[in-house]
Image: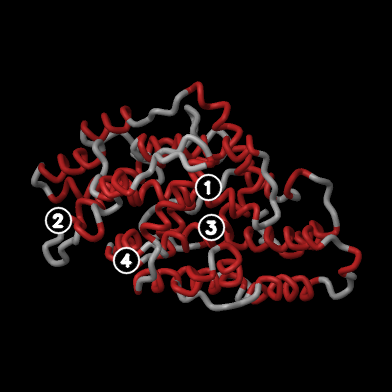
Amino acid sequence: MASGRFSDELMDRMRQRGDDLADPVVADVLASGRLSAVHDLMHTLVENDGVPPDGLPPNVADFLVRTADVDPGALPRIDEGERLFAEHGPEIVLVLLCSSLPAAYGCRRGVKVLHETAYLARRPTRRIVETAQMIIDVMSPGGLGPKGRGIRSAQKVRLMHAAVRHLLLSDPQRPWNTADLGIPINQEDLAGTLLTFSTVVVDGLKKLDIDLTPDQEEAYLDAWRAVGRIMGVVPELLPASMAEGRELMAVIDRRQTEPSPEGREMMAALVGDIEQNLPPLFTNFAPALVRHFIPPALADGLGVPAHRLEDRIAATVAEHLIELSDKMVDASARGRAVFRSFSLHLFQWLMDADRGGKRTKFDLPTNLRAHWAKPPGGHEPGVWHQVLHRLVPSWL
């Protein structure tokens, strides 16, 4: 049943609210009057995988201390959520690319930020890679612990959000319409993004025939709720349960989902990037998967080409299994093997993508590489896992 927490009145207020901690930090750097200070901060955030404390302005260093607020008592549940990511990480990234991002692109007001920011518009692949790297950092086992990279990675993204927010609001050439769009990267959009990383992912896994227990679902949300606090999502918009998360997602969908030219352009760029960086075996697989995950009306509004997922799976399997009889193999296992293979090819694309500047390459922890080489669920290798090893990238 609906909790009634998320009224339109509350959500309207949240669209006019940014980040009470990060925004003043960026404003103080800008108030120094030195363009070099702004450049140095942005260079540090964009060109480094971490945010080294040495040499940062004192207020930035203080911000990093104040926002590293993972409750040690919550770590056991967070660890359980991170173990779920270790088990199903390839499929989770598949859901993020083919369901979560399309959901975001379908929000007319929120997608405007992605489209209007020159840096993101020119480098859509780079934006996707950096988001994936943040997810790897926070959701790898131990990522949100004292020695993990997740806290610093989430803090960096939070400061970048504040910088983008300031740049869009202060651009005299393209005035930002706050009455219609709200503050750039506002609290409603931040909460929606957090839900696409959590509740949307959990529901997407079900569409890949991956069954999770209620405790696993709640633990995964617990991990992302911790990330949400680090990234500045206000308590009013942090759901207390998966049921509340789905309720809030439904409210945001009702309020924000609307076709737009910007959304269609971003969707076309995403599908084009995926298709361009996968082997011919997976031709037209990306749009078929998008339509498998999202509602038909949203897919139509985003201009997603119509391809049947069942046909694409059958073609993929036939390409490599002419000699085997489908009657001898479980259909759901066949589908899971193809999904895992496709997901690992997506990771190969992320690892090979040009990130620009002096940043290190995409960093996938060794323990995750080893884990993802095994069949999902820890079962003994079967015929479709053997097929998988004929399909997966060489980096495993």
Q: Are marks 2 and 1 in contact (CB under 8 Å)?
A: no
- The three-letter amino acid code for the residue at tag 4 is His
Q: Are marks 2 and 3 in contact (CB under 8 Å)?
A: no
- The three-letter amino acid code for the residue at tag 2 is Ser
Q: Which mark is residue 375?
A: none
Q: Residue 140 appears in which quarter of the rendering?
A: top right
| Mark with earlier residue (2, 1) | 2
- The three-letter amino acid code for the residue at tag 3 is Met
Label 1 Cα crowd, 10 Å radius (few <14 / some 14-19 / many 20+): many
Q: Is residue 281 left or right of residue 24?
A: right
| Mark with earlier residue (2, 3) | 2
Residue located at (68% from left, 58% from top): 340
- Alpha carbon distance from label 2 to label 3: 35 Å
| Mark with earlier residue (3, 1) | 1
Q: Nearer the viewer, mark 3 or mark 4?
A: 4
Query: Where does the image place residue 110, in percent across and percent down from the top left?
Result: 34, 59
Q: Which residue is mark 1?
A: 199
Q: Which residue is mark 4?
A: 115
Query: Where does the image place residue 238, in percent across and percent down from the top left?
Result: 41, 38
Q: Which mark is residue 351?
A: 3
Q: Residue furthest left?
A: 33
Q: Which residue is mark 2?
A: 170
